[in-house]
Image: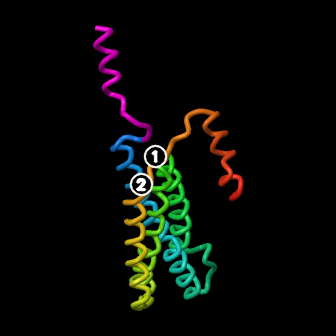
């Protein structure tokens, strides 16, 4: 029975380092949602400032401005969680999706006009995110202190730091 359990344990392990498919899916989902939340924060804050100015009060008393500020904090927490679940090379390009989302949201909530160059920029931002994710290199995970020291003493790392 012990031999069968040992064989079963070996078969259950993944062949290489890195998160499993479920963790990657969850991490990418969290990254997309947090990017959309981050994209909405500035729109909500500006909407709160405009509302407060119209009432003649401080924006600090406006619930919409506070919802934008709280959404910013929640979006950053979501980004942090996504970075812990999947490699950085997959999460970082998804942060750019907040720009088109914020632009589109601003055109609806703030009645701002999105010209052809703005629309083209949103399209290119989304396309660039997809291309970067599709062609992202396999990232190596550092598991020992010796590997970390080797990476940190790399001439390229020393040059950029």
| SS for callout 2 | helix
Which portion, as a residue range, is magenta? 1-18
Q: Position of residue 43 (x, y in %)?
A: 49, 77
Residue 9 in the figure: left or right of residue 93 = left
Tag shown at residue 85: 1
Which residue is rendered at x = 38% and y = 48% of the image?
A: 24
Residue 46 in the figure: left or right of residue 21 = right
The residue to which callout 2 is attached is 30
Q: Position of residue 21 (x, y in %)?
A: 33, 44
Which residue is rendered at x = 62% and y = 73% of the image?
A: 60
The N terminus lies in which quarter of the figure? Answer: top left
Splitting the image into 4 quarters, where does residue 110 fall? bottom left
Pointer 2 or 1: first along the chain: 2
30 to 44, vertically: above or below: above
92 to 127, vertically: above or below: above
| SS for callout 1 | helix
Splitting the image into 4 quarters, where does residue 131 fall? bottom left
Q: Is residue 27 magenta?
A: no
Q: State the residue in front, 105 or 79.
A: 79
Q: Position of residue 78 (x, y in %)?
A: 48, 55
Q: Nearer the viewer, mark 2 or mark 1?
A: 1
Residue 101 in the figure: left or right of residue 4 = right
The C terminus lies in which quarter of the figure? Answer: bottom right
Cβ–Cβ below 8 Å for labels 2 and 1?
yes
Q: Position of residue 59 (x, y in %)?
A: 60, 77
How many residues crowd mark 1 within 10 Å: few (<14), some (14–19), many (20+)? Answer: many
């Amino acid at each position: 029975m012990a031999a069968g359990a040992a064989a079963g344990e070996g078969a259950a392990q993944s062949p290489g380092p890195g998160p499993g498919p479920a963790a990657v899916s969850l991490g990418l989902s969290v990254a997309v949602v947090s990017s959309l939340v981050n994209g909405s924060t500035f729109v909500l804050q500006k909407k709160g400032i405009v509302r407060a100015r119209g009432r003649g009060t401080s924006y600090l008393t406006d619930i919409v401005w506070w919802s934008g500020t709280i959404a910013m904090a929640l979006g950053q927490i979501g980004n942090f969680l996504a970075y812990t679940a999947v490699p950085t090379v997959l999460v970082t390009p998804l942060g750019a999706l907040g720009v088109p989302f914020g632009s589109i949201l601003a055109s609806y909530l703030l009645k701002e006009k999105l010209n052809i160059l703005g629309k083209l920029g949103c399209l290119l931002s989304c396309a660039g995110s997809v291309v970067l994710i599709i062609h992202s290199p396999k990232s190596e995970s550092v598991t020992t202190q010796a590997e970390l020291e080797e990476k940190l003493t790399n001439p390229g790392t020393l040059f950029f730091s």
